[in-house]
Image (cartoon, grey):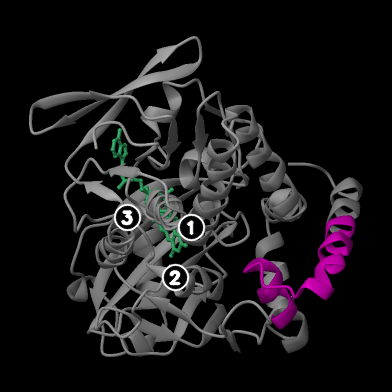
Amino acid sequence: MTSPDVLVVGGGPGGSAAAYWLARAGRSVMLVEKKEYPREKTCGDGLTPRSIRQLIDMGFDFDVPEFHRVRGLRAYSGELMMELDWPDHPVYPNWGGVIRRADLDLQVALLAERQGVIVRAHTSAVPILDRGRIAAVELTSRGEMETIHPKVVVVADGSLSRFGRSLGTARDKRLPYGLAARAYFSSPMSTDGYLESQLDLRDEAGASVPGYGWVFPLGDGVVNLGVGAMSTFHRWKEMNTNDLMSAMVVSAPDHWEMSEETRLSDNRGGKLPMSLSIGPVFGRNWLLVGDAAGAVNPFNGEGIDYAYETGRIAARHIGAALDADDLSLLGVYKDELDATYDLYFRVARAFVRLIGRPGTMRLLTRTGLRNRSLMEWTMRVMANLLRPDEKGVAEHAYDAIERIIRIGPNP
Ligand SMILES: Cc1cc2nc3c(=O)[nH]c(=O)nc-3n(C[C@H](O)[C@H](O)[C@H](O)COP(=O)(O)OP(=O)(O)OC[C@H]3O[C@@H](n4cnc5c(N)ncnc54)[C@H](O)[C@@H]3O)c2cc1C
């Protein structure tokens, strides 16, 4: 198969999910990944129930030893602490997980391959354009070059998205984004059953940072420790994620027995493009999915699930457009993204603007951690786990946040 119906560029969650669902619907699909599997990806390795839902639907085997199941979230703000189990929900399971991305992404690429996808690792793709259309794609693997002519291309090349940028995509600079970093540490608590987050994150000057620190247990003697911060932070220009990481190691609760001596890897960081801030998300014969579209949830920095979901939605619209032999139908993809995520991401953006104000994050988390029902509701909003009958609640939250923002000074 030299020219498949669909070429998927990038073998992370977005690309593998798009390829999986396209092949399952009977399409000829090639997926190219520029690195060799298993490939490392800088990540917190944390999966919420939304990710688990997508993995269940693709037939992921959760019994592999690399997967560690978690039942909820343990939130800290200073000395205040609350454990919150994932809620019961008609669509999403009430459990999550932690797994190194090298293992997760290899397994999901294999699931796609089992559906008939031609998976080519160590192969990078560059588009050849003709009046905004991808006329061909040049593939390079170990010095060998080949040109193919897919009908449609799924752009799933991650947050830097060089392939996407050469199609003319750009991030909307008015919208907030995140920066995050992580490292691995050994810990006797690695079999803990909760994702842990430190909501009172401070920079070296003691300023409260909008974002959070985390410790996610991998179940095999190792934990993933990291920090994520939002560009709405009033000291953003001076912020240094390495300094935040050092502070996080020192302030992590004693039960992790964390120190520089237990460190197993260097800090590695990356950008989190959020709330579908990159566009256009479709062109004449291509679609963006996952980080390439900036699909990360601003509330919690979660991007794996949104990559799976946007990949799956993209696959459906590509199938419909190919069936109808009418690629103008690819534009319906954007309509579905808007209908599914727009209101939620607007609420999230209002929230991250609010917490960018000095002291607000600390005030909110310390209030929240004294009130269990408020905190449970907040967790369900932030992890996008509201039940369908509660969706109106997000609109009320949006109105409330908007009112607060209008009243106060805008940083
Ligand atoms: C520090 C940090 C912590 C995070 N923690 C979490 C977390 O705990 N949970 C969560 O849900 N999300 C987390 N995220 C976000 C998450 O990692 C991303 O949202 C997710 O990986 C997006 O998936 P993707 O498939 O869009 O892109 P990626 O996973 O980046 O995959 C893109 C792939 O494309 C390949 N590629 C690039 N260019 C080409 C090319 N030209 N040809 C062929 N292949 C190419 C790359 O090698 C890469 O494998 C975190 C991010 C960071 C930076």
Q: Which residues are magenta?
A: 376-400
Q: Are marks 1 and 2 in contact (CB under 8 Å)?
A: yes
In the rendered image, residue 142, in percent from the top left (x then y), is placed at: 8, 33
SS of the residue under disc 1: helix
Q: Residue at x 81, y 64 (%)?
A: 394
SS of the residue under disc 2: helix
- Does mark 1's beta carbon lie closer than 8 Å to ligand 1? no
- Please identify the quadrant where the C terminus is shown: top right
Instruction: Please check the rendered image and state whether residue 381 is part of the magenta-colored stretch, yes or no.
Output: yes
- Mark pair 3, 1: CA separation: 17 Å
- Mark pair 3, 2: CA separation: 20 Å
Which residue is disc 3 drawn over? 42
SS of the residue under disc 3: loop
- Tag in front: 3 or 1: 1
- Tag in front: 3 or 2: 2
Tell me: residue 191, above or below residue 180: below
Which residue is disc 1 drawn over? 308
Name the residue nearer the viewer: 60 or 270: 60
Report whether 152 appears left or right of 368: left
In the rendered image, residue 100, in percent from the top left (x then y), is placed at: 29, 68
Q: Residue at x 73, y 73 (%)?
A: 386
- Mark pair 1, 2: CA separation: 8 Å
What's the residue type where badge 1 is placed? Tyr
Q: Residues within 10 Å of mark 3 (few under 14, many from 20)?
A: some
What's the residue type where badge 2 is placed? Leu
Q: Which numbered dot is residue 253? A: none
Q: Residues within 10 Å of mark 1 (few under 14, many from 20)?
A: many
Q: Residue at x 64, y 77 (%)?
A: 91
Tell me: residue 125, above or below residue 400: above
Instruction: Please check the rendered image and state whether residue 34 is part of the magenta-colored stretch, yes or no.
Output: no
- Does mark 3's beta carbon lie closer than 8 Å to ligand 1? yes
